[in-house]
Image (cartoon, helix red, strand yellow):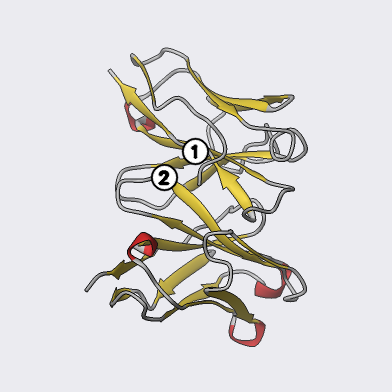
Amino acid sequence: QSVLTQPPSASGTPGQRVTISCSGSSSNIGSNYVYWYQQLPGMAPKLLIYRNNQRPSGVPDRFSGSKSGTSASLAISGLRSEDEADYYCAAWDDSLIAPGVFGTGTKVTVL
Amino acid sequence: EVQLVESGGGLVQPGGSLRLSCAASGFTFTDYSMNWVRQAPGKGLEWVSYISRSDGTIYYADFVKGRFTISRDNAKSSLYLQMNSLGAEDTAVYYCARDVSLDYWGQGTLVTVSS
């Protein structure tokens, strides 16, 4: 059911910068806001970025989001061990095959 | 503190029904739309259903249309998901989440469809 495409994995050493891409279409990313979620092992997802590039209170500024056309990306700078998690992008979809659509998910590993 | 607590999950036979509940607290329930999102074991997230603040707008994913019904009781600050004609493919942890941004999530309730 995933309509947004993400790389399955990404990795980096502590302190490095990691970028995760999210590719969609004109009916979702192209015409709606993008959201990013972090899911730690065994936990519920947590909102990381909303409205393309806004951080909720409490989310470190090491996390940043951007959007261009039908693609978006999440950047994690100053990578830390606690950033090891699954990351999902999401967007509402005007085609209404679902209320919204998620990305395929990216597992970030801190080496 | 915002809290969302799901309940009602469990083991159900194929073709059976289940009703999930989500009790909300720590915010004004009527100010927010609500959602159900699911995650099959070892898999990614799937948006299941959305309901607006006043029930006026409801959306379902194609894979649950005609089988699942979302509802809310604003007087009880509660969200519900009635699930009928369940199949093995519906086995998942079901989360309720607040707002179009899914800014807060519950801990999830596991639904297992198996004979």
Horizontal and vertical percent for residue B67? Answer: 52, 74
* Side of A109 where B19 appears, left or right: right
Badge 2 density bin: few <14, some 14–19, many ≥20, Cα 10 Å: some
Tag 1, which secondary structure? Answer: strand
Horizontal and vertical percent for residue B41? Answer: 30, 52
| Quarter of the view holding residue A50 | top right
Q: Are marks 1 and 2 in contact (CB under 8 Å)?
A: yes
* Side of B39 where A110 appears, left or right: left
Q: Which residue is mark 2?
A: B44
Q: Which one is nearer the viewer's eye here, B29 or B73?
A: B73
Horizontal and vertical percent for residue B56? Answer: 77, 74
Nearest to the eye among marks 1 and 2: give it.
2
On the same chain, marks 1 and 2? The answer is no
Residue B36 visible (yes or no): yes
- Seen at 74% across and 24% down, the residue is A69
For the C terminus of chain B, give its image quadrant.
Answer: bottom left
Q: Which one is nearer the viewer's eye here, A65 or B80?
A: B80
Horizontal and vertical percent for residue A24? Answer: 63, 32
Dot label at residue A88: 1
- In the rendered image, the vertical position of residue A73 relative to residue B74, given as above or below: above
| Quarter of the view holding residue A108 | top left
- Seen at 53% across and 25% down, the residue is A62
